[in-house]
Image (cartoon, helix red, strand yellow):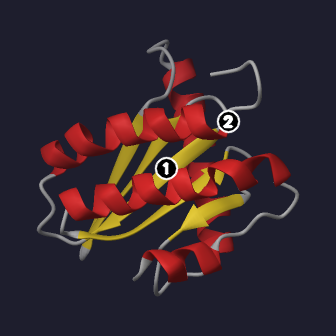
Amino acid sequence: MTFALTVARLVRKGRNKLFGVERAVLAELGQLRERLPDVAGTLVASVDGLLIAHDLSGAEPETFAAMSAAQLGLGQQIAGAASRGDFQETVTRAAHGYIATFAAGTSALLTVVAGPELNVGRLHHEARPVAARVGELVAPSGRP
């Protein structure tokens, strides 16, 4: 998918602050996909499930954003209940690939959908810093 088409799919519902960082978020997603050829799609959403940016195909992005937020929330609850610190990421292995959700600061998340040939170690290596940068880009003023 081209960068222009990705920009056209961006959702801004009530998120005027993000207008200035939309291109930067999409650029991060594009660079991640370039470094990980087995990635089929990416999504950035707020922790409350509102879609910020995506390049998914074959899935309803607004629904996927909401499900990703639920996955993040469940991971946070499990990490807290086990006294293991702040949630960082979760990876789901399915019959035909992987879905990984990463915390992106305190206000957003990054979800990556990939095929079965994905090198999960490389996913972690490449996606963790992207999630951190996305978290900085979309953070409310004065918060990481």
Residue at the image point whose x is 88% and y is 57% from the top: 14
- The x and y percentages for residue 16 are 84, 53
Residue at the image point whose x is 67% and y is 33% from the top: 139
- The x and y percentages for residue 70 are 63, 51
- Quick one: quadrant of the N terminus? bottom left
- The x and y percentages for residue 79 are 49, 25
Residue at the image point whose x is 15% and y is 46% from the top: 122
Task: Kindly indicate the quadrant of the structure image that contains residue 140.
Answer: top right
Is residue 112 depicted above or below 82 in this figure?
A: below
Q: What residue did someone put label 2 on?
A: 107
Badge 1, how many Cα within 10 Å: few under 14, some, many 20+? many
Q: Which mark is residue 22?
A: none
Task: Kindly indicate the quadrant of the structure image that contains residue 34.
Answer: bottom left
Front one among 131 and 68: 131
The three-letter amino acid code for the residue at tag 2 is Ser
- The x and y percentages for residue 119 are 12, 54
Is label 1 in a helix, a strand or a loop?
strand
Q: Which mark is residue 110?
A: 1
Q: Viewed as shown, does residue 33 lie left or right of 29?
A: left
Residue at the image point whose x is 44% and y is 30% from the top: 88
